[in-house]
Each structure stands twice: as structure tokens, then as C-alpha cells.
Image: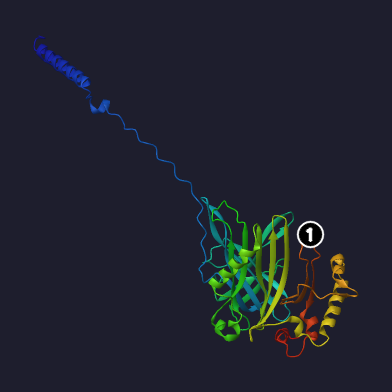
């Protein structure tokens, strides 16, 4: 009864032997079935992402940079304001220095000369509305206190918004527009020459630098102001080269310039001069200049006084100095008899008045001293018709 089943079982055994034999041959030939012999290919690890470097700061346009003078109101009172926008290399990225924008500004009330600040800003986006700060010590730490919140980016024809002075809580409205009606727009150019060989690691053995006042705008084509214009670039460079040839090795000769008054068509500036001889010895001095923008001539300040005005000016200086007890030793160094000498470095003119500047060329035994006089104090000593009377009329004196 079981005979019909035998062929079927034998045939199944033969097929199983054939499959086993084929599987063995496939294994010997290295061709295993995909389901049991396929290997997942090895994937190489992704390279590490490069470190994220800081993005160089956004820079202002050439039209934004430089000095600007504004006229308008702060808290409804007439003011003059001055700002400066410049670049300074202080961002270090991937072994390279990058420039970053800097802003500073101040204003003063035209009637009194009382000053206020428009704050400072560092590494700010120059295409966005301007916000400035003032650094002050609060407790034991420096804190940044907001000063100006402007409605525009810096360096444009308008400057409006709100400002708050350090130590005050009240915000004042600011409404300013760029104006040079009784002043001049300018920039300060620097020329430098040295005797180094051009390598970064080679110190220069001699160096000369000079600041030049470069007047800007169409008014500089007028004959009066053209006389005040600085020499062209080639002439400035030749002047530095001539001076460099005479200063000797390890010597430096530097002049820097600062404008202190730009109002009532008067331009006053201070020039600081320092000369170093070797690593230890140097001498320094400063001198002041006053220019009449109407005539283009330099004015001698003491020539603007009434007859007898020099003696009266000395007496006024002496009275103010004798009330000073903080720097009595320095003050007495400059007294000749009962009166304080006229300042050997001249008077610095500012919106607030005259500052008598005394200084020694060698700082080791320096008796530097300064004494301020207001325009109200100096006004009665000026001769009628003096160009300085223009400023007194602005002040209402």
C-alpha cells in the first residue's frame, strides 16, 4: 500500500541533493545567494565642518566717513554739533586685521558754549539707525549707558532722535542738519616717511609724520580759503622726505593736529609736536593757530586786544590762577613777580573760551599748566572790529 509513495520521496531526496550540490558549488565559486551573503558597503565618515570664523564687520561708505558739522536744536535750544566717523583696525580674523567703524560726537549750545555728548559707538552696522553709548563706572565695574537713539544711519545730512546726557534720566529731542554756513568742512590727512627696509619684522630707524588740514567743499575755491589749503600729495611727501634726511637714526619727528573751534568763520587749531632721540630722550611742544575764514589770513591772537589789553589779560589770568590751590606748585613756576606770565604755548580757543597753555619741552621736569577764561571774561578786552567780535555776537555778549 505504500509503494506509490516511494518514487515521490526518492525524487524529493534527489532534488535536495542537487540543490545542496549547487549550493556547495556556489559557495566554492564565491557566489552565495544575495539574501545570505551580501554585505553592506562601508561609508567613509563625513569630514568635520570647518570652524565658523567671525564675519568681518560691515563698513560704512566713503560718503559716511570723516568729520561732519551739524546745526539745529537739542531740547529746543540752538546748538552746533560735530561728529567723526572713522575706521580702526581692531578686529583680528584668521591672522589678518580688519577695520571696524568708530563713531564719536558732541554738541554745544551756541548761546553759552555749554557742551554735551552724542556718545560713542564701536563695531556697529553703519546702514542701520545709530545708537551710541557712554562708558561710566557703576560700583566697581564699567557699564555702557545709552546716550543717543537716532532715526538715521550715521554720517548723513540729518541727525534726529533722542539723547540723554550721562548722569541724567531725561531724554532730550535732537533735530540737526549738516551745515557749514559759518564754518568749513575739512579732513585731516597724514603723511609718513621712514627709513625702514619694508620688512614687517624690520624696525624703522627714523620716522617723520605730519598732519595736514585739508579743506573740503566748493568754498575752498574762493581765494581766501584757497590760501589755507594744504599742499598737494607730492609736495607733502617731498617735505617729509627732506625732513627725514636730516633727523638721523633712531629719531622720530611727529606733528599731529586738532581743530578746536570752527564757528563764526573762525578756525582755530592746535599742533602737537614731539621729537624722540634714541629710546629715552624726547622733547615736546604745542602751538596754536587762528585763521579768519573770510580773509584767509592767520590772526595773531594778542593783536585782537585793546591797547593795554595784554596787561589786563595777565591780571585776569593771575586772579583766576591764585584761586587755584590744586596746582599751586605748577602755577607758581610760571609767575614772574606778582603776575602770571602770558602762556608760552599760547591760548587755545574753544567754544567755551580761551585756555592759557603752559608747558615745558622736556617732560622729566614738566610744569605743564592750564587756566581757562570764558568769552564773557575776555570779551571786554577785545578791540572793536576784531574778527573775534563775530563770535561774541553769536554768544550775545
User: Which picture quadrant has residue 12?
Assistant: top left
Residue 102 vertical placement versus 40 (above, below): below
Measuring from the top left, give residue 107's x and y in whole percent. Answer: 67, 74
Q: Nearer the viewer, residue 207 or 52?
A: 207
Residue under label 1, please give it: 364
* Residue placed furthest toward the right: 338
- Residue 320 relative to residue 41: left or right: right
Asked whether the viewer can see residue 57, the reply is: yes
Residue occupying image coordinates x 15% and y 14%: 13
- The residue at the point 55 percent across, 76 percent down is 157
Q: Residue at x 25, y 28 (%)?
A: 35
Residue 98: x and y, percent? 53, 57
Q: Nearer the viewer, residue 114 or 74?
A: 114
Q: Position of residue 317 (x, y in %)?
A: 84, 76
* Dot 1 crowding, Cα within 10 Å, few <14, some 14–19, many 20+: few
Could you say which quadrant of the image residue 365 lies in?
Answer: bottom right
Q: Position of residue 314 (x, y in %)?
A: 84, 78
Determine the image quadrant of residue 280: bottom right
* Count of numbered labels shown in the rendering: 1
Residue found farthest to the bottom:
384
The structure's colour scheme is rainbow
Image quadrant where one finds the N terminus: top left
Looking at the rendered image, the quarter that the C terminus falls into is bottom right
Secondary structure type for disc 1? helix
Closer-to-camera residue (271/46): 271
Residue 132 visible to the viewer: no
Q: Height in image: 381 above or below 236? A: below
The reply, left or right, for residue 390 in relation to residue 64 is: right
Amino acid at each position: 500500500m505504500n509503494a506509490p509513495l516511494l518514487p515521490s520521496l526518492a525524487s524529493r531526496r534527489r532534488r535536495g541533493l542537487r540543490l545542496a550540490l549547487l549550493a556547495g558549488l556556489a559557495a566554492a565559486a564565491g557566489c552565495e545567494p544575495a539574501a545570505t551573503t551580501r554585505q553592506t558597503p562601508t561609508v567613509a565618515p563625513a569630514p568635520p565642518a570647518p570652524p565658523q570664523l567671525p564675519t568681518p564687520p560691515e563698513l560704512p561708505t566713503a560718503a559716511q566717513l570723516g568729520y561732519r558739522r551739524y546745526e539745529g536744536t537739542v531740547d529746543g535750544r540752538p546748538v552746533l554739533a560735530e561728529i567723526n566717523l572713522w575706521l580702526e583696525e581692531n578686529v583680528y580674523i584668521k591672522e589678518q586685521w580688519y577695520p571696524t567703524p568708530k563713531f564719536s560726537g558732541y554738541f554745544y549750545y551756541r548761546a553759552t558754549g555749554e557742551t554735551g555728548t552724542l556718545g560713542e559707538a564701536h563695531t556697529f552696522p553703519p546702514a542701520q539707525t545709530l545708537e551710541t553709548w557712554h562708558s561710566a563706572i557703576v560700583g566697581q565695574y564699567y557699564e555702557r549707558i545709552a546716550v543717543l537713539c537716532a532715526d538715521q544711519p550715521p554720517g548723513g545730512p540729518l541727525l534726529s532722535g533722542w539723547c540723554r546726557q550721562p548722569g541724567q534720566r531725561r531724554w532730550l529731542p535732537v533735530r540737526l542738519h549738516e551745515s557749514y554756513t559759518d564754518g568749513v568742512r575739512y579732513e585731516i590727512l597724514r603723511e609718513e616717511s621712514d627709513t625702514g627696509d619694508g620688512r614687517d619684522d624690520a624696525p624703522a630707524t627714523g620716522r617723520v609724520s605730519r598732519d595736514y588740514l585739508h579743506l573740503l567743499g566748493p568754498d575752498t575755491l574762493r581765494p581766501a580759503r584757497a590760501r589755507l589749503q594744504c599742499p598737494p600729495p607730492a609736495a607733502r611727501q617731498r617735505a617729509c622726505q627732506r625732513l627725514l634726511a636730516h633727523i638721523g637714526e633712531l629719531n622720530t619727528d611727529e606733528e599731529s593736529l586738532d581743530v578746536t573751534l570752527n564757528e563764526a568763520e573762525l578756525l582755530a587749531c592746535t599742533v602737537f609736536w614731539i621729537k624722540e632721540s634714541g629710546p629715552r630722550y624726547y622733547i615736546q611742544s604745542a602751538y596754536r593757530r587762528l585763521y579768519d575764514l573770510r580773509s584767509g589770513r592767520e590772526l595773531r591772537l594778542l593783536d585782537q586786544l585793546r591797547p593795554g589789553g595784554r596787561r589786563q589779560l595777565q591780571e585776569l589770568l593771575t586772579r583766576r590762577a591764585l584761586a587755584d590751590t590744586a596746582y599751586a606748585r605748577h602755577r607758581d613756576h610760571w609767575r614772574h613777580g606778582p603776575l602770571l606770565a602770558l602762556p608760552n604755548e599760547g591760548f587755545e580757543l574753544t567754544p567755551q573760551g580761551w585756555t592759557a597753555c603752559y608747558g615745558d619741552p622736556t617732560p622729566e621736569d614738566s610744569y605743564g599748566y592750564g587756566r581757562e577764561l570764558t568769552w564773557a571774561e575776555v570779551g571786554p578786552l577785545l578791540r572793536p572790529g576784531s574778527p573775534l567780535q563775530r563770535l561774541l555776537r553769536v554768544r550775545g555778549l
